[in-house]
Amino acid sequence: MSLLQANDIYGGYGGADILNGASVRVEDNEIVVIIGANGAGKSTLMKAVFGLLHVRSGQVLYRGEDITNRKPEQMVGRGIAYVPQEHNVFPSLTVEENLEMGAFAIKGDLRPRLEKVFSVFPRLRERRRQDAGLMSGGERQMVAMGRALMIDPKLLMLDEPTAGLSPRLIDDTFERIREIRSLGIGVLMVEQNAKQALGVADRGYVLATGANRFEDTGKNLLDNREVAEMFLGG
Amino acid sequence: MEISGIAAYLVSFFTFVGIYAILALGLNMQWGFTGQFNIGIAGFFAVGAYTSAILTTPESPWHVGGFQHPFLVGVVGAVIASALVGLLIGAITARLRTDYLAIATIGIAETLRLVIANEGWLTNGVRGMSNIDRPFSDFFQAIGLSSAMGSLIVVAAFLAGVYFLVERARQSPWGRVLRAIREDEPATAAAGKNIGRFRLEAFVVGSAIMGLGGALYAHYFGFLSPEAFLPLYGTFLVWVMLIAGGSGNNKGALLGAVVIWTIWSGSEFVMSAGLPEGYTGYAGPLRVILIGVLLQVILITRPEGILPEKAPRAIAKGRRG
Amino acid sequence: MTDVYILIELLQLSIYGIVLGSILTLGAIGVSMIFGILRFAHFAHGDLITVGAYVGMGFLMMTHAPVWTALPAGMIGAAIVAVLIDQTVYKRIRRTQPVILLISSFGIGLILRSLVQVIWGPNVYSFPGGIQRPWMVWELAIIPNHLWILLAAVVIVTALHLFLTRTRIGKAMRAMSDNMDLALVTGIPAERVIMITWLLGGALAAGAGVLLGMDSRLTPTMGWNILLPVFAAAIVGGIGRPYGAIAGGMLIGLAMEISTLFLEPSYKPAVAFLIMVAVLIVRPQGIFKGAW
Ligand SMILES: Nc1ncnc2c1ncn2[C@@H]1O[C@H](COP(=O)(O)OP(=O)(O)O)[C@@H](O)[C@H]1O
Ligand SMILES: [Mg+2]
């Protein structure tokens, strides 16, 4: 049974549909990447899967269970964590408080979880008492991902985790994402840095006007001439 | 009550409905058309009332004045004065978010009330101003009508005039821009409209209309004191009228004035008849509770009012507004 | 000679200003928290202050307990009232525009004020204790109650600070105020946090009400009359930022009292209003930096 399966999703923000039958699938321990032009509906698809946007037609299955249009709270309760594209930290909370918010619903000692996050992002340990709002873009992205990891998710959804980062930080971020997968977490991410993202991905989807255009392993998509012309700079 | 008593009551009833309808139309210009949140209506109402009173009353040892200008001069003065106050407030708050405008308007209304109560030389303070003549009373007497009936006719005429003007304004290109701003400010700004100026214009026009309402009130009632401009009468009832009737819709504003004033003044009868001896002092607060609860019920069950602007429009756009 | 006199007068007024400021602070923190999380200016807050004062007084009348118990009693009472209002009314219109909540709260304020009149009548009440002999320190008159008021305000604000920084739900309140959408995504239970916000806002308002009642008297309009200064304190402090409200409250309280050197005391609310307008013009985000 797949970890996540979104089938034939239609939906939008109240007006016309933005998603026109998009589908994605994530297996355990898989990195799956969604690429596509600006405005293709990548972020919208993530929101629809996570229950932030009404799915008008179609189905979202998590380990076979129908979770279509469930509330985000219930998604989190099932082990799905989502990091939005923008404004993804609480600026006036410290790093540690941000992480603590990620595990709001979890009773008991958070320290083992914090340690786990700090082992993936050692920088956050140094900065734990700092306000997240005062940090650099790269550090904030770490806080955001760290926050999501606090629930020990089975599925981590990342919307453009490398946006606005320097090339060195981009490499580093993809490295972390691989590390996260090695913890037994499936990753579904939207990426603009298509070449590198497909390099780390097990499989990838190319979205256009809210529907699947291509779907293949990361390697095959990298080799696909049409995809290369559109997104990989020739 | 005798026939003449009932007739007199009806005259008074409809005069108040007319005055409140004018206030509600003024508020509709601000809130209904542009989404500007004025909860200091009482302040503009008071500026109009006192300006006209000071301009028209005879010499008095208690306050400035003695200008004895005719009624219409008082009205024009009231409209200008309240428009100027509106200009000042609007200019300060035009670029701020709604909540600040709301707080600023209530602040100006309360401050004006303090000025009225404390500056005796200007307004005779809490003792109030009297000897404010009813409009054209000599003329109406000559044709055999009471001055109260005359006031009703004058109020009705002004109401008709204001209604005609705001309806025209609503259908004009200017009015369409106002509604576009209310519905989607960024898009309207992107279309090259100067949002701040349109807003301010609507706010000033609305304030002027409220000032007119104040002047008519002063001349009908004949006596002014700071009590009349408590937020309950001056502001709250007008809001309930507009929301009950259907904001954005001038007919709704008229209907709301009739319905709410009927309930408000009707509740006075019911309470005085229904409350046991010794409890009549509770009538006032109980009536306020009645209207207050009514407002909440409308907001929860029918926020678009009795007469919606169009087909019931979805108010919810984004949760965070 | 006259210089010394003016100095004494100024110091004396500053003491009153600090006392008033601590009362305003309690109200302003609530307004600021509610604004931060629900994004609307709560116009019934003044009347919640009144309710708190009357509940505290009613508790004393029923139990003849020591005066200080009016404070916790009023705080509990107003906290419950605030939550009830939210659950019966605000909750149902929260999904529409925040401005609708504004007009609703204006109406709720009038309802509360009228209920106080119906339940307690139009009489003026005072907390027991009578007129207090001031202590003379140098040339300054210090009223014992003023010390208690200040102490109570400091204790309440400190407790709130600990709650906001040490408890998970307190941190969640700050998180929701920072970014409501992210809080939802994170799995923070919004409704529960909102309920806690009303509990705290109501309790703080009652704190202001009881302390205000101890400083003067209880009237059905006592809270409405300080609503404007409370808003001014919240805005000067940067609305949505409760810690700014402390500085805002002190500044407004001092300005209001010191203004009586040149102005009729009845203009005190107008002084608060003018400072607020000046701040709105110059720095719409408030004059004090920092978030929660
Ligand atoms: N909150 C919103 N309300 C209405 N339309 C939106 C909203 N967010 C995005 N859209 C529209 O949906 C389409 C897809 O956007 P999005 O999913 O963000 O694209 P991307 O693939 O770049 O992430 C765009 O046309 C965008 O204008
Ligand atoms: Mg996107």
Image (cartoon, grey):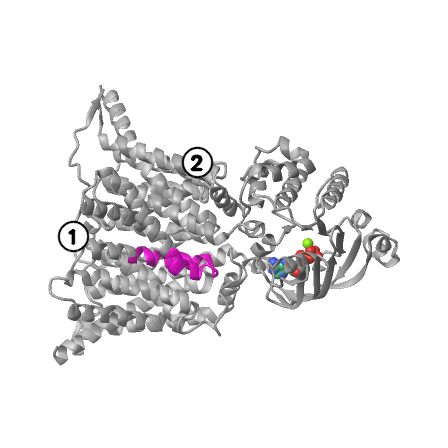
Which three-letter amino acid code belongs to the residue tagged 1?
Answer: Arg
User: Residue B31 in magenta?
Assistant: no
> How many numbered markers are drawn?
2
Magenta: main secondary structure equals helix
CB within 8 Å, label 1 to label 2? no
Q: Say if disc 2 is inside 8 Å of ligand 1.
A: no
Image quadrant in which the N terminus of chain B is located? bottom left
Q: Alpha-carbon distance for marks 1 and 2?
A: 51 Å
Q: Is residue A96 left or right of residue C264?
A: right
Of A123 and B228, the residue lying toward us: A123
| Position in image of residue C47 (x %, y %) | 30, 51
Task: Point out residue B81 in the picture as x, y percentages from the top left corner.
Answer: 33, 55
Is residue C142 toward the left or the right of residue B22 in the image? left
- Tell me the SS state at disc 2: helix
**Distance from mark 1 CB to nearest ligand 1 atom below 8 Å:** no
Q: Which residues are magenta?
A: C85-111
Residue C109 falls within the magenta-colored stretch: yes
**Residue B77 showing in the rendered view:** no
Crowding at dot 2, Cα within 10 Å, few <14 / some 14-19 / many 20+, comes out as: few
Q: Quadrant of residue B15?
A: bottom left
Residue B31 can be seen, yes or no: yes
Residue B79 is situated, as x and y percent measured from the top left of the image, at 33, 60
Labels 1 and 2 positioned on one and the same chain:
no
Q: Which residue is mark 1?
A: B127
Q: Which residue is mark 2?
A: C162
Give the vertical position of A82 relative to C264 (above or below): below
